[in-house]
Amino acid sequence: MCNKNASVCVNYNNVIEIIACKEQHTYDVENKKCVNDISCSKYSNDFCSKCVDDNMEMHDGKCVTCSVPNCKYCEGGKCKKCTENYVIQTNGFCVEKSEVSCVNSDGLRCLQCTENFYSIDSINKEGNYHFCLPLSLAQIEDCKYSIISKSKCIECLDSFKLKNGNCSEQFDENEQETNSTNIKQDLKGAEVSCFIRNNKGCERCNKGYYYNNCDGECLLCSTNCKECYNTTYCTSCQPGYYLSSTFTCEPLGDLFTKCDLTLPTGGGCAICKDHYYKQKTDCISCDESCGTCVEGDSCLTCKEEYYKLSGRENKLCVSYDNLTNCDTKTPIGCVKCNSGYYLENYQCKNCSENCISCDNALSCKVCVEKDYVLFNSKCLYFKEIDYCKSANNSKCIECEGYHKPSDIGDNCNKVTNYGLVVGLPISVTLVVIILIVVIIIVVILWLQNQKQKKKEQNICNFKMSRSNIEMMKISSNLVSNKKKLAFDLDNNDPLKVDKETRDLICIGNDSKNNLKVQFSVMEGCDFYEIQTVPSLVSLKPGYACEFEIFIKPLCTCSTKEDVMITSLNLTTGIMENTKIHIELETEQTTKLNYRELEEDEKLGEGSFGIVYKGKYRGNVVAIKKMKQFDSNESGLDEFTKESLFRKKISMVTELALYGSLQDLIKHKKSDEIDMKLKLKFLLDGAKGVSYLHENGILHRDIKPDNLLVMSLDITEKVNAKLTDFGSSRNVNMLQTNMTFTKGIGTPVYMAPEILKQQKYKKSADVYSFGITIFEVISWKEPYLKDQFKYPWKIAEFVMGGNRLKKLEMMSNEQYDIISDCWSPQMEKRITINQAVQRIENLLN
């Protein structure tokens, strides 16, 4: 078994070998086991790769403490870097910095010596570092730090200034000491380069000079630079020059060759020419492959004969020469490849073997012309296809034995003899179908024959020579027992309207050929319906048939008409028409025959029709022709469920000699009509409304104009009649004609609920009757035109809950009836029967 710190072991010759240790454990090579090394902070492949402390090093895969005191990094038993405040010697040991006159150290060398000492990085004869040496050994006057090997001061005492490695309180412009030998040199004007100088050298240079880090002095900029950072880095240029992208000053003439528009100051370019891109104020030439660019390593457009591929890391253009096997080259790459290649990322790549056209390396479309077949987008040699003998144009064109190429030519299918397999079942099926059709035809003919025989059993055909019925000649081929039909078999009473009445007539064949005989009515007959049984009959020579004639009058009529008997000679083909006279006299009903109406003059026009004066059977009548109804059945049925003359709908009433009550108000003064007669007119009108309401009909247009005055004699039973209610049931027309002029009603007589376009009931008629009472009693218009100039003013007045005030000629009882009729609230209005009772009380 593995020990507790191992994760993988093997047993080899009964010896357990450790293959891998658990996490955070190392392999002890000497003892061949996994151990937990507490000094290790990072593990790799069962060995420690990093120790916990920096002063530890790896030894045999374990962390051990460095043997050198004050060492930070140790390797191979030697110190590579000391801790803070120590410097390392050549023998690898660490010494305290104060022991070598050092102020600051980095663990390797001294960074700063104590005062009156200078640093030295050279090795003495014994091979040791001195780090810091006394300044007196440098032999440079007034110097704090110096490079002894170069006899050069690098920092003077605080009260002195440093120049060219020498220290002095003040440097003469004309001469200075250059070294310890006091050799003088003419330096007239040399101090012009430095603007501020201190004990460490020049602190700030004048314009046209730059600071040299090597000797701490200011050197002159290049010829064309106005200001610079070093000898090759200009920051501004002299007049006539511009700062290039390489920070050198170039003549402005060079700028015009690559710049379209310069900056107003002339110190650079604002817009570059083609094949250049702008970098700060300079124009840099694009790559040779670019047509235009905005940076050096990326083209916007390509130069002629170059193309650019999207998605490439290199954004430059590529020469057309790289587009091999391409038929059509464009600035975006290849768009059409040569035969045998396919397009991928605008480059041409090889199709698979024996393929001359493909979409990609795995999908071929066309194979080489001969011997190869396109199968599952691959080109196969034709012998690899079962039963294939030869191939051409990517298809197998010939197969072996009873096989033939498939529709797409990628394999060989076995041939089936459809002539035998399909033909035999089809032939048998056709024979069966023909037999079934023949049987069906025979059965149909037999059934028709039986039906005809059954009909003939119901038809009364007889031989005229054996009958005692007296027949009369009515045409060259026909004889009959009657010359007219009166439909008086049962009795002589008038015929019922909308009910059938029958008569019998015998028609005989008096010719030598067979005849077909049938009855027909005259064209345009719309006031009765007629049918015959049988409708059509075949008569042999010398035979007759009894016809049963049924007639149904559609209206009240008294007429004499002719019906037609049509006979067809089956031998000669000659058709003959013979008339038989019919006489009708129906009972009196409300359905009149419009042919009996005679129109005279026009009397007036209402909401639903035009009224004419006319005559009906010698009586003077009023004929109201209704305006056109909706074409749908339901709209027509609202007016009448009986009338069939839908295009000739009229209402016929007796003619009132005195016209309407409105006409009487216009033509006679109030004192000419007695108040009792006025109340009698209103009582008769109220009874008419009551009759309508009892039958579930709303009038919707009650006014004096619709009360016809029949008599001015108060002793007559009826003095006035209500009219214009026959159309009141047509709700659809009511809605479409609701206007303030010729529509149903006017605002004068309209109830408030109608004006508000709300649902209304019988109480709307009661309101209109209340206004009518007011107008008849006052014998003038209820709403005077000087107060109500426009119809909508009346509507506003009524909808506001206002009502007309009581007039002087009205009694309190009369005005109370009016007030109860026109109450603003529908449910508080009296019924029309209550109005009848109260008007009768006034008369009595």
Image (cartoon, helix red, strand yellow):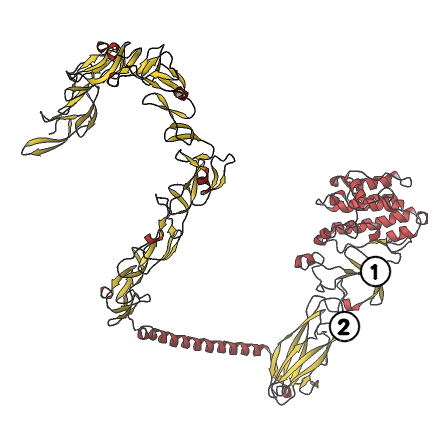
Task: Identify which residue, 58 or 799, lies in the foreground.
Answer: 58
Local crowd size for mark 2, using a 10 Å CA cut-off: few (<14), some (14–19), many (≥20): few
Number of residues whose C-alpha sits closer than 10 Å to that of mark 1, classed few (under 14), some (14–19) or many (20 or more): some
The reply to whether residue 696 is visible in this rendering is no
Q: Out of 306 and 673, give the one closest to the viewer.
A: 306
Q: Earlier in the sequence, mark 1 or mark 2?
A: 2
Give the number of the disc on residue 151: none
Q: Quadrant of residue 401?
A: bottom left
Q: Is residue 421 found left or right of 276 in the rendered image?
A: left
Decide if residue 259 is on the left or right side of residue 474.
left
Please tell me whether residue 43 is drawn above or below residue 393 in the rendered image: above
The N terminus sits in image quarter: top left
Residue furthest left as drawn: 13
Marks 1 and 2 in Cβ contact (< 8 Å)? no
Circle 1 — which element?
strand
Secondary structure at numbered mark 2: strand
In the current view of this chain or complex, which residue is farthest to the right? 671
> In the rendered view, would you say 358 is above or below 33?
below
Label of residue 559 in the image: 2
Left or right: 146, with 39 as reference point:
right
The percent coordinates of residue 594 (x first, y second) are 77, 66
- Left or right: residue 64 versus residue 106 is left
Residue 614, by quadrant, is: bottom right
Give the labeled residue for mark 1: 654
- Per the model, the C-alpha gap separating discs 1 and 2 is 23 Å
Decide if residue 770 is in sight here.
yes
